[in-house]
Amino acid sequence: MFDRSTAPDPSEVLTILARAEPEAIRAEAEAILPALGDVEVLQSRTGLVMLPARDTVEGTEFHLGEVLVAEAHVRLSDGTEGYGMIVGRDLERAMAMALIDAALAAGVAAERLRGFVTRMGAAQADADRDTLRRVEATRVDMETF
Amino acid sequence: MAYVATRGGERAIEQAERLYRAQTGEIGADRVREIEAALPALVDRVMGEASLYAPDLAALALAQAGGDLYEALLLLRAWRTTQPRLQIAEVAEPDQGFTHRRISAAFKDIPGGQILGPTLDYSHRLLATEVLEGTPFRPDPVEPAERRAPPRHTALADWQKAQGLVADRPRRPVDREDIPDLTREPLLFPAKRAHTLQSLARAETGGTLALGYSAMRGYGSAHPTVNELRLSEVEVTVRHPNGTPFSAGRVKTSQAEVVTTKGKDGLRLGFCATLGWNEVKVISGATLDLNSPGAPANSPVNEEFFLYHTEPVESSGFCIHFKLPHYVTFQSALDSLRGAKAEKRSAERDEAARQPETTS
């Protein structure tokens, strides 16, 4: 979904980080951790996000149900904050995302992290493409069905 | 209701639970992972009814309840109350999900085409008994197409509105904090549409099917045709503290529109959606939604009737509470019955005593 030539915007970067492969994002966060200095953990918890949807008949917004998420919020010694939220209850993944977000905001390991985000984004686009090619294989033409 | 307290039964209660749990034995992380991987349809059904999207917890609840769906739901609904609500996500628009399956039984040529997706709809249903003889059942892998399917499709209802086939009602946008929420307020009738749709989203599948099926068989006024059935993964779009929206991940959702030609001004539609992939529930739920306007009281398609009777924790809880000691209430009813009988006998005796006088 992110197969584009331009650099991803902040919203896309966060989306890519939230979906990043768990082992890869953990390793990346560990690698940049020494360069971040002291990190204050403001929040590390699981919780719920209510997901509303829209009905196609009357356009009514309604609540579909709640999604379990893990959330992390950190602050660096210079005051820069980082935030992570991922679907599921993997607190380490959320923390890794928050640390990388803080590093990106503070300009720490910027080159390295841009590369990481680009790699993860490309892998996710590949995975989506593979899924959609398998889905496409199930297309039917009702005239000849 | 009057119950008696259970005294002196601690040991019996403890041993009864042990006897129950002896059936399933030790539960480890491997078993939970296996349930999640092997039974996605069941895990999805439980997540929808629990109104909590957490596949690993749903699998754990199933393992712990030994597959008793109502016990599993109770565990999940109870666990949910221990968690803080962190945010309300952006509204998942019906045409923005990453679509895996999207079909219409009413129109064969729909924009974007008919995509069967993962389904057994047109498959032979044969039990693979050879598995029990030691020959594993190995499904053939999908042969991917050269090109990819479009990730998103317009909602068929939007296409029909554009064609003038369906009445297009003006939208009244609501701030997401103000969307009515059944987890915070009671269900009152006539129900707000947001409450009806939320209640159907968390309704029990079997109950929704039973009542929806009654409408399909003729106890409703409108026969449904599936206008659109869709299985997707939708983005859970949350906000960074600095205000930037982003997706925290995707969750599986199902949605169905059913259509009838019995409309005053064109086609009339019913809608239902739920967390997880559960087609029977959304088709049945949409059929109930289609039939509910103007339905007579006490009919299965009356919204009060179907919403109250498909709430899984309340209905199963009420059913199984009848197993608990009711000695006081039952004794009281029995006393009334005996009293009435004694009065009747006494009246008969009085009548019999009077009779010689009246006939003489």
Image (spheres, coloured by chain):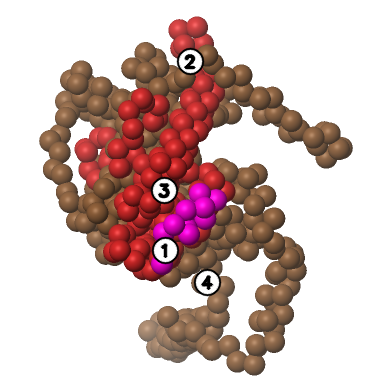
Chain colours: A red, B brown
Given contact means CB atoms under 8 Å apart, are the residues at marks 2 and 4 in contact? no
Residue B337 placement (x, y as % from top left) = 48, 81
Kindly indicate whether the residues beneath marks 1 and 3 are on one polypeptide chain. Answer: yes
Using the image as rendered, state which of residue B338 and residue B228 is in the foreground: B228
The residue located at (23%, 51%) in the rendering is B243
| Most frequent secondary structure within the magenta stretch | helix
- Residue A109 bears which disc, if any? 3
Given contact means CB atoms under 8 Å apart, are the residues at marks 1 and 3 in contact? no
Give how far apart the Cα atoms at labels 2 and 3 are. 38 Å
Residue type marked 4: Phe
Front: mark 1 or 4: 1
| Label 3 CA crowd tier, 10 Å (few <14, some 14–19, many 20+) | some
Of all chains, the one bearing label 4 is B
Instruction: Point out the stretch of residues depicted in magenta.
Output: A27-38
Front: mark 4 or 3: 3
The residue that mark 1 highlights is A37
Residue type marked 1: Gly
